[in-house]
Each structure stands twice: as structure tokens, then as C-alpha cells.
Image: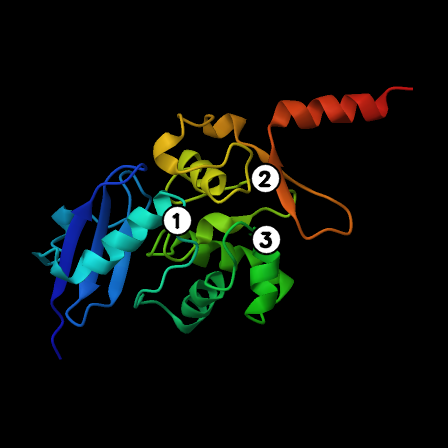
Amino acid sequence: MDTRTYWTEIGSPLGPLLLTAATDGALTSLSVPGQKGGRTVQDGVGRSDPGPFREAAEQLAAYFAGELTEFRLPLRAEGTAFRTAVWEALDAVPYGTTTTYGAIAARVGASRAAVRAVGGAIGANPLLILRPCHRVIGADGSLTGYAGGLERKTRLLTLEGVLAGAGPLGDQPATTAPSQAPVISRQANSSVSTLQPPERIADRSAATASP
């Protein structure tokens, strides 16, 4: 079996994206600078060749321009059966929506006690953006962790319209610092999620508490 790996680096509004692929063209990873557990060229990931990545580059460019909402690319991530099931469950989370770690656990048939393991699997997702782990949030509405950094997670959710100020990422200014990350607010009896800055939520809470 041919185990060679190809890689390329493409520019994006989130910084350079490092992609790797198997010889048959299946994408095996997408990493961003500073990503926890991300791949680097120094890892000896294989031969530099943009050929297998042309379609991925085109689709990513369309996504960042706000013109594409679903990737149609061959993906092949290596992991345990449990992690693979969690990663595949991410594919079912639609563009412009969010879900929780608990919901992903339920989707793969895991118990409540396994939510932490689900979070670990999501944090180890080797195909950032392509497998949308950025759409998974905490049960309390917080953005929680993201291997690519909370600023990138905020920008991706902004692009997808979950956060106010949506638009092509190339037109977006720098986002809030992780300590000021927005919080998801869910309307009662509604499947729609919105993001609000923490200060707005605090103001609303104070108003509710006033006599």
C-alpha cells in the first residue's frame, strides 16, 4: 500500500492553511498556525504538491467569500472508531447553526458520562473547517475551546451568520479577544441560535433583576 502523503499550504483570511492528502486525493488534515495538535511541514508530512488540492482550494475560497455552505471533498481522518464516529457526526451540523457537545454525544450513542470524551475527540479533529467542529458550543451557550483558537471560531461563526455582522471573512475586522468571546443565546421554543456579547447579556440580566 502506498502510504506517501502530499501537502500544500494555501492562504486564507484565518492565516495559512496546511493541508495534507493521501495519494488518492483524500484529504487527511487541515491545520492552522498555532493549532493545538496541528500538523506542520517540519513533521515530515510528505511531498509538497498543489495538484491534489486544487478543488479544496477552490471550495475553501468560495466558503470564505460567503458563496459556499457545504464542502464536497473526499475526507479521510485516522482515529479510533469512537473518534471517527464523532468526526462524522460533525458533518451533519448544517452551515449557520450550532449544536452542543451533549447533542453530539447523543448522536453517536454515547452516554452523558462520555461527553468529556466527545469533547476530546472534537478537539482532536484533524480537518478543521472542513469538518465543522467550530459549530459545537457549550451547553451554557459559551463558545468553549477550539483547537484553532477562539478568535478563529468567532470569525467562522460570524461568516456563517450565527454571529451578528456576518459577511465574507475577507471583509471582517479582527474579532474580540477570547476572554470577551460571545455567548450563544437560545430563544425558547426555537431552534435558532444567536450570539450576543457578554456585556449585552449582563445588561439584560441586570434589567431583569431590577424591581
Label 1, label 3: how far apart the Cα atoms are: 26 Å
Number of numbered discs overlaid on the protein picture: 3
Task: Using residue 40 as the reference point, say whether residue 70 is left or right of it.
Answer: right
Residue under pointer 2 = 142
- Is residue 144 in view from this perspective? yes
Of the two numbered discs 2 and 1 on the same chain, state the one appearing first in sequence. Answer: 1
Q: Quadrant of the C terminus?
A: top right
Between circles 2 and 1, the one closer to the viewer is 1
Depth check, mark 1 against mark 3: the one in front is: 1
Numbered mark located on residue 88 in the image: none
Instruction: Identify the amino acid type marked 3.
Output: Thr
Tell me the residue that label 3 is attached to: 100
Determine the residue positioned at 63% across, 45% down. Answer: 193
x, y percentage for residue 38? Answer: 28, 48
Q: Amino acid at mark 2?
A: Ser
Mark 3 and mark 2: Cα distance apart in space: 10 Å
Where residue 120 sits in the image (x, y, percent)? 45, 55
- In the picture, the disc for residue 67 is 1
Q: Residues within 10 Å of mark 2 (few under 14, many from 20)?
A: some
Toward the bottom, the furthest residue is: 1
Q: Residue at x 11, y 54 (%)?
A: 44
**Is label 1 in a helix, a strand or a loop?**
loop
Relative side of 71 to 47, left or right: right
Q: Is residue 201 above or below residue 15?
A: above
The residue under the point 78% across, 21% down is: 206
- Please, what secondary structure does the residue beneath circle 3 have? strand
Graded by Cα atoms within 10 Å as few (under 14), some (14 to 19) or many (20 or more), the crowding at tag 1 reads few
Image quadrant for the N terminus? bottom left
Instruction: Report crowding for label 3: few under 14, some 14 to 19, many 20 or more residues within 10 A (C-alpha).
Output: some
Tell me whether the residue at label 3 lies in contact with that at label 2, contact meaning CB atoms closer than 8 angstroms. no
Q: Earlier in the sequence, mark 3 or mark 2?
A: 3
Quadrant position of residue 50 = bottom left
